[in-house]
Amino acid sequence: MRSVKASIVGSALWGSACASLYPGQSSVNHTCQLQTPYLSCSPQAYPNVTDSCCTETYGGLVLATQFWSTYTGLESQGQVLPKDTWTIHGLWPDFCDGGYTQYCDLSRQYDPVPVPNTTDGKTTGTIVPPYTGPSIGTFLEPFGKFDLLAYMNKYWVNQGAPNGDFWGHEFSKHATCFSTFDLPCYGPKYKEHSEVIDFFETTVAYHEILPTWGWLAAASIHPSNSTSYSLTQFQTALKSGFGAMPYIGCAGPRYNETEAGRGTMDNGRTVLSEAWYYYHVYGRVQGRQGLPVDASINGGGVSNCAKAEGVVRYPLRTVGSEV
Ligand SMILES: *[C@@H]1O[C@H](CO)[C@@H](O)[C@H](O)[C@H]1NC(C)=O
Ligand SMILES: *[C@@H]1O[C@H](CO)[C@@H](O)[C@H](O)[C@H]1NC(C)=O
Ligand SMILES: *[C@@H]1O[C@H](CO)[C@@H](O)[C@H](O)[C@H]1NC(C)=O
Ligand SMILES: *[C@@H]1O[C@H](CO)[C@@H](O)[C@H](O)[C@H]1NC(C)=O
Ligand SMILES: *[C@@H]1O[C@H](CO)[C@@H](O)[C@H](O)[C@H]1NC(C)=O
């Protein structure tokens, strides 16, 4: 299947043969050097106004997302968590209004366990077939990107399954819905999987400038199994570091289902687990010129954590899970 795909790049059949975001788009002349890098979600960021390969016109609200987890489940195979660092979840192209779509190009389906298993999450949607080929991690080898692979194995860590499964999930579910990672953008000399490498490099670049652990530590907020924190403490520290309010996600029990919170109306969760940083981006997402925006930009909530004072845990990693 992959060789068929490579052979039709640049041909007139492209639009009909592949689920490109903009069917029929030519694979030539996406000269981003000559294009103004418009801000995504601005009035210029539409495919009828500018080249969708040079400004993000599809999923213009870009989320760089990170996890705080305490174990991987595959420690015995050397899959461990990096000390003093949150790990990468992904880089997501939400629509400007906050909605999103997923699995936008099934010809680039490298996710062994698609979730959801249809493109729209409904039983009537198009089925996303599980991928059974070699791990997406192997795609980096012909490009000699072993340092990138090492970074990903260290900082883009899966739970309960190999890291490559997770990378394939993130690429196929999300990256295929960015206009600037669309295949025609790569031109007639496209080398198979170039955009996969590009997506991984871009995702890693955003992780490098979002030191969640360090921003919290600078506010004297450290992982602890004896102290708990208030959501507002995390919010103040991360907003100060990032320049806008991120979405802060929690897992674990709901506060009003715990002993301490029983009888209250606070049903927020009580274990810190995610941070989502929202951006509008100038030009190509690959250009890394993000403008931080508040997670509330579309009127949504900025956390699902408990709001009561001092009830959110930021747990230490399990002994042996962290290196
Ligand atoms: C691409 O650009 C070249 C040089 O400007 C031009 O000759 C050619 O017609 C263009 N092709 C398309 C499909 O626009
Ligand atoms: C481009 O498309 C958008 C959305 O479909 C529309 O609102 C806008 O008026 C169009 N702009 C031009 C210049 O045609
Ligand atoms: C898709 O997932 C749903 C629940 O997540 C499950 O009930 C259904 O059987 C799955 N369908 C296929 C085709 O695997
Ligand atoms: C927890 O809070 C929610 C929302 O405020 C409320 O609807 C629910 O009844 C509460 N649950 C308990 C067990 O008190
Ligand atoms: C801290 O608590 C978490 C569970 O919340 C547990 O998985 C972990 O092992 C604990 N770490 C240490 C060092 O005790």
Image (spheres, grey):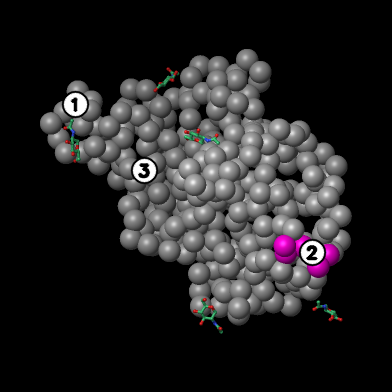
Q: Of helix, strand and loop, which one carries label 1?
A: loop
Q: Amino acid at mark 1?
A: Ala
Please give the residue where the numbered disc 3 appears in the rendered image: 234
Residue at point 51% right, 41% down?
116
Instruction: Point out the tag, 2 or 1, that comes first from the N-terminus.
Output: 2
Instruction: Point out the tag, 2 or 3, that comes first from the N-terminus.
Output: 2
Quarter of the image for the C terminus: give it.
top right
Q: Of helix, strand and loop, which one carries label 2?
A: loop
Q: Are marks 3 and 1 in contact (CB under 8 Å)?
A: no
Q: Are marks 2 and 3 in contact (CB under 8 Å)?
A: no
Residue at point 64% right, 36% down?
130
Q: Is residue 269 above or below residue 176?
A: above
Q: Amino acid at mark 3?
A: Phe
Compared across the picture, whether 254 is left or right of 34 comes to left
Crowd class of label 3 (few under 14; some 14 to 19; many from 20; radius 10 Å): many
Dot label at residue 13: 2
Residue 13 colored magenta? yes
Crowd class of label 2 (few under 14; some 14 to 19; many from 20; radius 10 Å): few
Near-viewer residue (219 or 56): 56
Which segment is the magenta one? 11-16
Dot label at residue 260: 1
Q: Amino acid at mark 2?
A: Leu
Mark 3–mark 1 distance (CA, rounded to whole Å): 21 Å
- The location of residue 124, given as percent across then percent down, is 49, 47
- The location of residue 96, given as percent across then percent down, is 47, 64
